[in-house]
Image: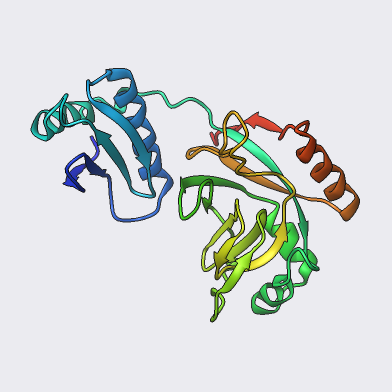
Amino acid sequence: MANVRFLLTGDTSLCAEFGNEISEKINAEIRAFNILLKESHIPGIVETVPTYRSLMIHYDPGKISCKTLIEHLGALTEKLDSVTIPPSDVLEIPVLYGGEMGPDLGFVAEHAALSEEEVIRIHTSTEYLIYMLGFTPGFTYLGGMSDALETPRLKTPRVKIPAGSVGIAGKQTGVYPIDSPGGWQLIGRTPVHMYDPARETPILPEAGQYIKFRAIDQKEYDEIAAAENAGSYVVKKYPRKEAQ
């Protein structure tokens, strides 16, 4: 059984904390707990939000008290080992690396003592777990990046980073879903709309899925961008093969 702490975070929410580190084991426990919570149909649950090491639970205090909710949640933790987590989907995200799209690729390569081609090869060789979404709608916090690419943030953040920019900050990599400020080192850009408020499902990625980056050239970038703008591009998605 996971060692779970329940922490009050407001008068309509609480946090189920599963640990104090970023790990796939903790993430699996959070996913299993979220599955149990949805299957339990506890009255008054409004929304759940997974993070790196916890699950935020929003509830309606008019339908269930905090004390009763915690009692229900505590009982669910006893059943974590019985949950079968379905295979995660992998989203293939095409990226144009370097140049205007990735102005910091050269710095990342220099910092890592690698060529730009080696940085791209390493960055596209991993299936990255989406631990959580945040900062802006659909911003992906990804785990699993090679230590070889670890690079510090910019000393002075940019005022505006274009939507679709792929960046590195410390041990993390991720995609900026909308134009926004930011201090990550930009190595490329995807033409895929990670967030589109006009779409039936505005946010493309989901916590618990994986992202696999694929390097593309300018021609393919332009073709995908045109298809995205026409609403006809479909991101490739496939079930992840779990390690045996």
Q: Residue at x 67, y 60 (%)?
A: 162
Q: Residue furthest front?
A: 198
In the image, residue 53 sits, relative to residue 118, either above or below, namely above
Tell me the colour scheme of the image. Answer: rainbow
Q: Which residue does the image show at 29% across and 55% down from the upper left?
A: 20
Q: Quadrant of the N terminus?
A: top left
Q: Tell me what residue is drawn at x 75 percent, y 65 percent.
A: 118
* Total count of labels: 0
Location of residue 219 in the rendering, given as x and y in whole percent from the top left corner: 91, 50
Name above or below for residue 30 compared with residue 189.
Answer: above
Farthest right residue?
Answer: 219
In front: 118, or 37?
37
x, y percentage for residue 102?
A: 73, 66
Quadrant hosting residue 61: top left
Residue 172 spot, x, y in % from top left: 53, 60
In the picture as drawn, the residue positioned furthest to the bottom comes out as 155
Q: Position of residue 244 (x, y in %)?
A: 53, 33
